[in-house]
Image: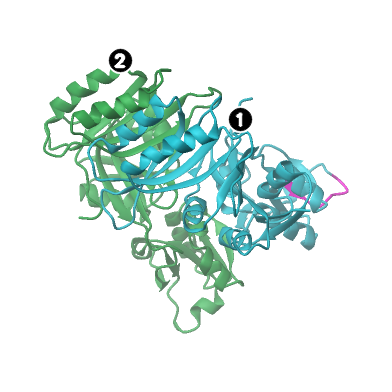
Chain colours: A green, B cyan
Amino acid sequence: MKTIAYQGALGAFSYITALKEFGEGTFIALRTFKDVFELVDSGKADYAVVPIENSLAGSIYENYDLLNSYDMQIVGERYTKVGHCLLAIPALQKEGALQKITKVLSHPKALEQCSCFFQEHPWIEAVVSTNTAAAASEVSAMGNPAYAAIASETAAQFYGLEILKKGLEDDPENYTRFVTIAKTGKTDHDADKCSLLLTLKHIPGALADMLKLFADGDINVTKIESRPLRGRPFEYLFYVDLEFIGKRQQDVEQLLQQLWSKVQTLKILGFYKSEDLHG
Amino acid sequence: MKTIAYQGALGAFSYITALKEFGEGTFIALRTFKDVFELVDSGKADYAVVPIENSLAGSIYENYDLLNSYDMQIVGERYTKVGHCLLAIPALQKEGALQKITKVLSHPKALEQCSCFFQEHPWIEAVVSTNTAAAASEVSAMGNPAYAAIASETAAQFYGLEILKKGLEDDPENYTRFVTIAKTGKTDHDADKCSLLLTLKHIPGALADMLKLFADGDINVTKIESRPLRGRPFEYLFYVDLEFIGKRQQDVEQLLQQLWSKVQTLKILGFYKSEDLHG
């Protein structure tokens, strides 16, 4: 049985994604993303599932930074729809239950993503929890009908809570892309995607040259993002995702060898099978 | 006297930035970014100052979307260091004031950026406000020494609050880049930067071709970010910033004309003078 680490608690979106990815296993909830990377690094977990970008909030820099500092590989990706529900303890009378709620707990990002709900219910106070599942757990433990949590449908099941309202999010097109990481990458599999972290040399046109190399090799750039490096003006870290459907991983690895003349630093974050969000 | 719109309230980081940019004027606080764009669009405000990216959280998609839907131009940029302070009503005894606080109000992003503070002070509840300055205003109005706000030093002055603690943020390298927008762009000025929003044609190597055009024209790409378009697989919106120190705006405009053969859509968000964060 595999051991899979994630940040949050049972019923969190990371947990839901880990469950989709692995089906079964020992799932270990940790408080911070750093703790998650540490556990895989120490060998106490085989895998970890961490969010890497969100369709509304963009790239999650913290996890890119951790991928950069730890020696790990991305071995898979998954998109999970983030659906926020209002959860409360089961009431004898469902009618009017929402009107009795004065306090709603959740993760700061979830509270921000449900700002319309709070505007429409001005008597409700939004209180920060460490994550959505922890909020559900707290509400369940308190047993007070004046408290509610914003969390997933799955969290409702885990903590014996009732769903008072679904679709609390301001924007329903809310997806998070998660990656599965491990100490060593896979090689004998059907990879069609690759993620890179790199800094370019101070040569005019270095970025254009790099992209021309990919274009000539018939490799699709599905993500590119520059991020200024702290305290190092005019230096940028690039997040690049490549898709190479119908090509062999070995050929792409060979092509990436040619990158070394153009980059200052290059870290291949892993080869893995892409998930088509639109499929 | 110019009228400048911003999102938030007196003492908010948008307000602080607007004040740095304009020195004097009529500053109008609005609840949402959309309200801010509307006011400039209607002609009731001459300018607006809005955040566009943050060094820790990345690009603020909402304002890029608004720049895309409204017919406006970026006419300037400013970096503001985001420093979070703990503000409370002036106490007779400063000693032990922190121990008496049970509730801290702020914007969800600010609460998230100060997570270490809340871990170290587990008796304090983090409560969401619409923005940092509104939190300061509420704490001031309540006059209760058990309440505090996380907001700027400037907010302390505006709302007659005392700074109990500075540097609450987990990561001190917290900068937000703001842009000044207006109905029409400037032409007769010392612009050395240009922002673009574009989608590329479905041609292999279109991205490489575009960047080669910039490289050949001796134009520096200071930001590039791809963002998947909703419901349109394999189509991406690109955020691009160009720097052209020592070149004339007209020459860059001419070069951008050549982009039309490579792009599907192109919106020039404006020509403006860059601010050097590291300068």
Outermost residue, top side: A261
The x and y percentages for residue A235 are: 47, 24
Please name the residue shown 35% across and 64% down the image. Answer: A153
Q: Residue under label 1, please give it.
A: B277
User: Magenta region's main secondary structure?
Assistant: loop
Which quadrant does the C terminus of chain A fall into? bottom left
Q: Is residue A68 magenta?
A: no
Output the chain of dot 1.
Answer: B
Report the chain holding disc 2.
A
Residue placed most toward the observer, A204 or A171: A204
Q: Position of residue A265 (x, y in %)?
A: 37, 19
Residue linked to disc 2: A261
Which quarter of the figure is the N terminus of chain A placed in? top left
Instruction: Answer whether residue B89 is magenta in the image.
Output: yes
Residue closer to the observer: A79 or B246: B246
At x 33%, y 56%, the residue is: B230
Residue A156 in picture, x, y percent from top left: 37, 65
Classify B23 as above or below A166.
above
Q: Which residues are magenta?
A: B86-93
| Relative side of B249 to B224, left or right | right
